[in-house]
Amino acid sequence: MADNQRIHPAVPVATSATAPLVPPSSSVSEKGTQVHRASPLQGGGPVIFAKPRKRKGCCCRLLCGLISLLLLILILIGIVAAVIYFVFQPKLPQYSVDRLQISALRLNFDLTLYAQFDVKITATNPNKKIGIYYEKGGRLSVWYSNDKLCEGSLPRFYQGHQNTTRLDITLTGQSESGSTIMAALQQQQQTGQIPLDLKVDAPVSVKLGTMKLRKVKILGRCSLVVDSLSTNSMISIKASNCSFGMKL
């Protein structure tokens, strides 16, 4: 009877296939939240994000261009200046003090020192191709040590090529601490050598051919040594040393 019993294999029960609840490009997290995943083949190929262009190279090129332009301008200015120098050969005007006379030198009631000097100077333009316009505002002054005794105005005039002009200028002024200055001058006069400084501040315009250039300043100083400060008498200039420069 046992031989008649047969063991039949178990037939698997067919289960119906169910469609996935989420699309293949997404998954479900442990908490049930649907998470989408980007497919690398969407749109027919991988997604490529373009990097933003860097502007560093553009700024460097712009800076190099500005530096090159500046160097070119400086080179052109240097070439023009060299041409002007070799063609016109500019020289500073020369000055000398020919005569110095004291018309007044006295103490006032307020103990200020009043001075009036009459000065005759010679201005020479040594340039062959350059004219000089003496503009308004030129000043000439006489100093003792650090105290200005008097000053006056330079006239406006044009000085041509290789021209010599003589100027008579009256200088007047009042100085504080007059008693102190007068005592020092009287003590210095006993030695027969009184140091004075004559200073020039002259705004001028230079004429190159037919072209008038911008205004510049001629600054000068003449160190004088005179023998006396007597009024209304000719004063002997025992020594004179003048130096001049130009200020743009």
Image: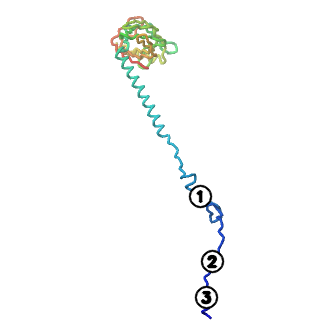
Packing grade of label 2 (10 A; few <14, some 14-19, many >=20) is few
Q: Is residue 238 above or below residue 78?
A: above
- Front residue of this view, candidates 99 and 168: 168
Packing grade of label 3 (10 A; few <14, some 14-19, many >=20) is few
In percent of width and height, residue 42 lies at 57, 54
- Front residue of this view, candidates 50 and 59: 50
Label 1 vs 2, first from the N-terminus: 2
Q: Secondary structure at mark 2?
A: loop
The alpha-carbon separation of the residues under discs 1 and 2 comes to: 36 Å
Q: Which residue is mark 1?
A: 37
- Front residue of this view, candidates 50 and 140: 50
Residue 87, quarter of picture? top left
On the picture, is 174 further left or further right than 28? left
The alpha-carbon separation of the residues under discs 2 and 3 comes to: 18 Å
Q: Which residue is mark 3?
A: 6
Label 3 vs 1, first from the N-terminus: 3
Q: Amino acid at mark 2?
A: Pro
Q: Amino acid at mark 1?
A: Arg
Residue 125, quarter of picture? top left
Q: Secondary structure at mark 3?
A: loop
Q: Secondary structure at mark 1?
A: loop
Label 2 vs 3, first from the N-terminus: 3
In percent of width and height, residue 151 lies at 46, 13
In percent of width and height, residue 66 lies at 45, 31
Residue 84, quarter of picture? top left
The alpha-carbon separation of the residues under discs 3 and 1 comes to: 53 Å
Q: Which residue is mark 2?
A: 12
Q: Amino acid at mark 3?
A: Arg
